[in-house]
Amino acid sequence: MTEWQAQAERRWAGRSVQRLEDPGMLTGATRYVTDVQLPRTLELAFVRSHAPSARILSIDLDPARAVAGVHAVLGPADVADIQPTVDILHLDGALKTPRFTLPGDRVRYVGEPVAAILADDRYTAEDGADAVTVELEPLGDDEPMYADIPGGRYFHQAAAHGDVDAAFARASHRIRRRLHVQRVVTSPLEGCGIIADYDAATGELTCYLSTQQPHLARAALAEAVGLPVSHVRIICPAMGGGFGGKEVMLPEYLCAAVAATRLRRPVRWVEDRSEALTAGAHGKEAEAELEAALDGDGRLLAMRSRFVSDTGAYSSGIGAYVEFMVGAFTVPGLYDLGGYAYDTGGVVTHKAPLSPFRGVGMTTSQTLREVLLDDAARALGIDRMELRRRNMVPDGPWRTVLGEEYEPGSWRTAFERALELIDYDRFLTRQSTAREQGRLLGIGVTPFVEAAGIGSAGGAGGLPGGSHDNATIAIDLSGRITVALPTFSHGQGHRTTAAQLVADIFGVDPEDVRVIDGDTARTPFGMGTFGSRSGVFIAGTVNRAGEVVRDKLLRVGEILLEAAREDLELVEGAVGVRGAPSRRIPLAAVAGAAHFAPHVRAELGDPTLTATAFFDPPRPTHSNGTIAATVDVDPDTGGVAIERIVVVEDCGTMVNPMIVEGQIRGGVAQGVGLALLERYVYDESGQPQTTTLAEYLLPRATDLPPIEIEHIETPSENGTGGIKGMAEGPASATPAAVICAVFDAIAPHGATIEELPLRPETIAAALAQS
Amino acid sequence: MTAISVTVNGTTHEVDVPPRLLLADLLRDELGLTGTKIGCAMGACGACTVLVDRDPVRSCLMFAVQAHRRSVRTVEDLAAQNGDLHPVQAALQAHHGLQCGYCTPGLLMAVTPLLEAGQPLDPDAVREAIGGNLCRCTGYETIVEAVVEASRR
């Protein structure tokens, strides 16, 4: 524990402080990328492929040039000097799928950009795009997508931990389960977007960009367009949701950057909903299979899994790797397995590229495992919760069969508490009464663990993609505290939580702390916001930087107040002598003395009250919890009404419980969407069928019940002041709870469903067949 | 171009607009009122909801010319002149009824007429009332709590 933590009363951390972000958002003052208006901006619109797989025979851009108000057009030859983007992971045996900004030879999915039109406004740019003629020659199924990736399988990895084959050989029960996890769309309310603005005098390219990773986007964009990283500035003023879908360097962004540089005018592209649904951040689609070996008492001996992610046309960013690698590595979850084997990988297909989406991989593994455990319990005639009890790991630290070291957690306590809250035993009684009346009630209860805040040491199974961050804290001459963060909040309230942490360090109120994020010119390097990492890294970096600055303030206090360090405190925006309110020096005076009082400056050596600190956690934090859901399935229509959802959650020390609960509720809502509503459909020829929000169904207020939440706090031991990352666990475990509940409801009918989501027609058809 | 006269948040604007210009784009691009967001441009998400003659309207489904001689109210008009939040804005903040904030302006305008009618609302009525407003962040529950509370003030 650091000195300030020992000393300070933690006045702000742990409280549900109202968000500092909210007034701007509530009044319409907060500016998102789409709200930034620069003079002389040109709007971009794209000509997109209408074929899933075709050779490009010709592109006639002249009709677009003839449209009044069109200023320029970009075809493949115009952007040939942009470096193709490839996925950024370095894994042995991984084949690359280079993505050219506007590919001149062939198209690989419907919606792929083919040409770009720049005009005075979006209406005119779309007129120009409509005028372009693209001649395509369809390619047959026998034409490989990439010459060097026969069969389309660009990555495959298989491994066994423990003696899996022997366990299966001696098992008295072997249970197998297949699921097709549907393709979904991340669907933040704000689409992707960029405004690129080139300064010919300085050679600096400023991009207003809707990105979760300002610094990584800066590096990727600079590399692609051939600028030094220092010449690119990324500004993200505010972001209307991301959920993993805003981590990829898109060809649309590169077109905007190059056009702005050449035309010397700001260039803007904002993804509309039809673009987002057709060619935007899709997620999750996978074919998954799991087999369990159990003894006669229902004890799990080993598991074998198989994952194949349907990656779409390109493996972009970290793309589908996080789906199929995290999926394979998170199968053991909270169960004590003697052996585990996985076989995992991805294939390219003529669909939009797969992007990370909240709960990457975990959603699939959690759903598959929990559905399989219920199948096993039914096959063995053991209560489903009892089967889990017989196999769950004990509370506390745990080393998984894959060698992953879990921090101490309340695995079993959370599970039992969720059963109490949902009143499991009483539900079973009600369920059996209802069954006699022909009603189909069901319950699903799924315990989860989430590894978050993964440092350079990597995650489970050696998954690459570890990360580190910095934060800067500075006190200016007016005594105001500014914190600069490389993470970027897209709804998680980072400014508030960071201000709470900093307020405790310096003895001020959160409103007195200015938090800057979303600007590479004003923040130190870091990896951005994904994988529930931001709370962990903000706490880790801010605590460390704060300690350095705090130490300097106290040093000035020692000199000016002629007092010993142990008698000083930071309180009410001043350095003061403990117990002597009359002997306080406001922070502005401290900063002034540091800069301008020669004896103080000489003593300090460096007058700046500024520190940048680095944090790289030794291992991930592990939050946990349990989701319990009850449902009422209509036997005629197959419609599912969710009765209750209970969440017991443990993310260690909470900085702002209100924000934690917001992440839980939002995650649960997305999980309900995945379980029951959302699916992106291509027909057999590769044509998208769900290109509007009338066909692609997102959860609405009327689709969700109230969500009951209870907390347990098992602090992290990872150098974060007890904080554990938590935003994806509830999202990834909710589909399992709802799906298990539906399967429980229809189990007496012997109906088996392998296709997600559980739409009414799917359920009704399964019931009709049984 | 068509000349129209439209009153927005109490100020009358005489503007020439292309006939196909959407009301949402008039508000955002011509009048600089970027609080109104566009989420889907086809009337499915509700992010662009504004009041036209006091009724909630999807400003992405209405042409600017259709607002000729009509009165439009946007999110920028909800808070008091001195900056004090409207009770429903304050309730949304207190209940954490917003996260990324992108759906918030449309949602506020969708519930404003109901709240100004002065009747206390129950949670089911609020869920129905906001059933046409998509939020991807919150799970809606805290929005429902906030609107219910604002209706009972």
Image: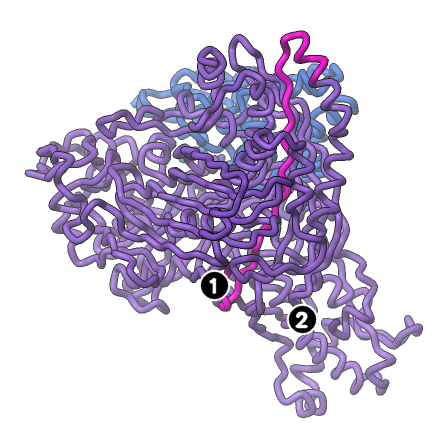
Chain colours: A purple, B blue
Vertical arrangement, residue A730 with respect to residue A11, above or below: above
Q: Which residues are magenta?
A: A432-459
Residue farthest right in this picture? A579
Pointer 1: what residue? Answer: A466
Q: What secondary structure is found at the residue carrying circle 1?
A: loop
| Residue where numbered disc 2 is placed | A546
Q: Are marks 2 and 1 on the same chain?
A: yes
Q: Position of residue A417 (x, y in %)?
A: 76, 40
**Screen quadrant of the C terminus of chain B:** top right
| Left or right placement of residue A123 versus residue B144 in this view | left
Residue A179 location, quadrant: top left
| Residue A535 in view of the camera | yes
What x and y, as percent, mark residue A314? 28, 47
Q: Position of residue A595 (x, y in %)?
A: 65, 82
Question: Can residue B23 be seen at all in this image of the molecule?
Answer: no
Position of the N terminus of chain B by quadrant: top left
- What x and y, as percent, mark residue B7? 50, 22
